[in-house]
Amino acid sequence: MSKLTLLGFVGLFVAAVLLGYFALGYRPAAIRQQPMLPVIFKHMDHKEVACAKCHHNFTDDTGSGTCYSCHKYSPDINLHMEEMFHDFCRDCHLEERHKGEKAGPLRSCAQCHDPKR
């Protein structure tokens, strides 16, 4: 078998694999590669905030439990969950500070997460 023929077979094989890969609508599995640290959230520190701001399931009646317990089933959210939750909390704190309200700084992991738990 000539090198050119072998190269042709390898090219066809790669093309077939790629075609199958994209034809099946491949999406990466929503598997967390690292455990999420438990969150320390003091509801009393947030008593001025409407519950539905965070707990949308109170208003749309989709269930109860932790944010993760509901959102982990959506691959689009699960793959970006940690970033989305961090953005959600940080943005709210920044909004409050811009209004001149007291909103504690979110500068270290240990302020919201207890790595010992």
Image (cartoon, rainbow, N blue to C red):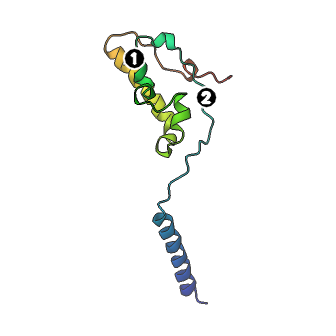
Residue at 40% over, 9% down: 102
Q: Quadrant of residue 6?
A: bottom right
- Comparing marks 2 and 1, which lies closer to the viewer? 1
Q: First in sequence, mark 2 or 1: give its number.
A: 2
Furthest-bottom residue in this view: 1
What separation in Å lies between label 2 and label 1 (alpha carbons)? 25 Å
Nearer-the-camera pick, 43 or 116:
43
Q: Is residue 116 above or below residue 29?
A: above
Assign a secondary structure to mark 1.
loop
Tell me residue 62's x, y (percent): 46, 33
**Dot 2: within a 10 Å radius of its alpha carbon, few (fewer than 14), some, or many (20 or more) residues?**
some
Q: Is residue 69 above or below residue 14?
A: above
Q: Which residue is mark 1?
A: 50
In which quadrant is the C terminus drawn?
top right
Tell me residue 21's x, y (percent): 51, 65
Assign a secondary structure to mark 2.
loop
Residue at 53% over, 14% down: 42
Residue type at mark 1 is Ala
Furthest-left residue in this view: 99
Q: Is residue 111 left or right of residue 61?
A: right
Residue type at mark 2 is Leu
Q: Which residue is mark 2?
A: 37
Q: Is residue 104 above or below residue 4?
A: above
Label 1 near label 2: C-beta < 8 Å? no
Q: Is residue 100 above or below residue 21?
A: above
Tell me residue 57's x, y (percent): 45, 29
Residue at 58% over, 20% down: 110
